[in-house]
């Protein structure tokens, strides 16, 4: 049986599941919730208190899981549900999407569905004043998927602040943010190791990740050229001090600048072990000159309560 990971906060206590859920203990997958069982929300709550963040579903349950996920995304507007609960759900939806990116980009249909999910989260971030804070409240990203989720969250919120609000612009930005580091997969490098700690040989492999990503996605016609371009350029910073093209960031599109700023911001948070909610002063100090100052200030403004 092939399993796919799903984050725990996408399973909503009180909402029955019609797919099987497994927990991984060591190398074994243990049946945890059967689709025929009445759904016991307390079991999910107790797992959370034990620090479990990830559960698994069999590949054949994915369609039912995604249907269930979309019902939850529809509830993001429901103000009767606590903002914290909705935020955790939104955050874990993005993390799950990043972790299962290969499935989302596989076909036109799955890709379009992912775009719609991104839009639901963008709308939530735009409409709820405290959504960004709640979504980032878990602190430093613990893996590459949480990083991608942070970058998407920050980029979608910053986009609304700088006037990028049309669906046709939010969709490519959100998808590029979610997929931007896909080229790190299969590189053989520990994705948690910051590039500051790599030896020259490893650094060479690392620096190839934007171009590696392009080779992974460019044959898929449903991923527009704009998304491919944004992923290729996501490590470009300042006046030609990034990679792979040593481009001047100020000459690239506003969406690209938003993506690159949010990526570098969350990357710095990972390197320093600081929460994205608390690192903007340090970032401004360390990275001044590498990004448009007005844009850094706008990022600072969205991070203030
Ligand atoms: Fe990257
Ligand atoms: Fe990144």
Image (cartoon, grey):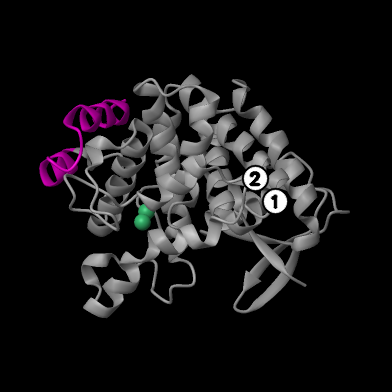
- Name the residue carrying label 1: 107
Can residue 52 be seen?
no
Magenta residues span 281-305
Q: Residue at x 63, y 34 (%)?
A: 116
Residue 73, image x and y in percent? 64, 33
Residue 15, image x and y in percent? 75, 39
Labelled disc at residue 80: none
Which quadrant would the C terminus be assigned to in this image? top left
User: Label 2 to label 1, Cα distance in Å?
Assistant: 6 Å
Q: Label 1: how many residues lie within 10 Å, few (<14), some (14-19) or many (20+)? A: some
Q: Residue at x 29, y 73 (%)?
A: 204
Is residue 37 found left or right of 12 in the rendered image?
right
Mark 1 within 8 Å of ligand 2, using the beta carbon: no
Is residue 107 found left or right of 77 in the rendered image?
right
Answer above or below: position of 17 versus 204: above
Residue 75, image x and y in percent? 66, 28
- Name the residue carrying label 2: 111
| Secondary structure at numbered mark 1 | loop
Q: Residue at x 27, y 51 (%)?
A: 269
Q: Within the magenta stretch, is there residue 285?
A: yes
């Amino acid at each position: 049986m092939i399993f796919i990971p799903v984050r725990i906060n996408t399973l909503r206590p009180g909402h029955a599941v019609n797919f099987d859920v497994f927990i991984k203990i060591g190398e074994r997958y243990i049946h945890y919730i059967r689709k025929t069982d009445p759904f016991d929300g307390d079991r999910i709550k107790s797992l959370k208190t034990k620090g479990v963040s990830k559960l698994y579903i069999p590949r054949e349950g994915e369609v039912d899981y995604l249907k269930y996920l979309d019902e939850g995304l529809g509830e993001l507007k429901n103000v009767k549900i606590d903002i914290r609960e909705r935020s955790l759900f939104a955050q874990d939806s993005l993390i799950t999407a990043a972790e299962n990116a290969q499935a989302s980009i596989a076909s036109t249909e799955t890709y379009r569905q992912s775009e719609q999910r991104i839009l639901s989260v963008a709308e939530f971030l735009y409409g709820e004043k405290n959504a960004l804070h709640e979504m980032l409240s878990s602190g430093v990203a613990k893996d590459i998927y949480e990083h991608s989720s942070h970058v998407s969250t920050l980029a979608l919120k910053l986009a609304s602040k700088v006037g990028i609000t049309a669906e046709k612009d939010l969709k490519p930005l959100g998808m590029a943010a979610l997929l931007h580091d896909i080229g790190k997969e299969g590189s053989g490098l520990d994705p948690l190791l910051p590039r500051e700690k790599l030896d020259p040989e490893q650094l060479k492999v690392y620096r190839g990740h934007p171009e590696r990503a392009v080779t992974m996605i460019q044959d898929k016609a449903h991923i527009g050229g704009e998304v491919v371009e944004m992923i290729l350029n996501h490590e470009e910073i300042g006046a030609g001090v990034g990679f792979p093209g040593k481009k001047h960031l100020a000459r690239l599109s506003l969406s690209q600048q938003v993506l690159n700023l949010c990526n570098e911001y969350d990357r710095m948070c990972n390197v320093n072990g600081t929460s994205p909610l608390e690192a903007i002063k340090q970032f401004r100090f360390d990275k001044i000159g590498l990004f448009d100052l007005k844009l850094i200030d706008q990022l600072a403004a969205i991070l203030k309560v």
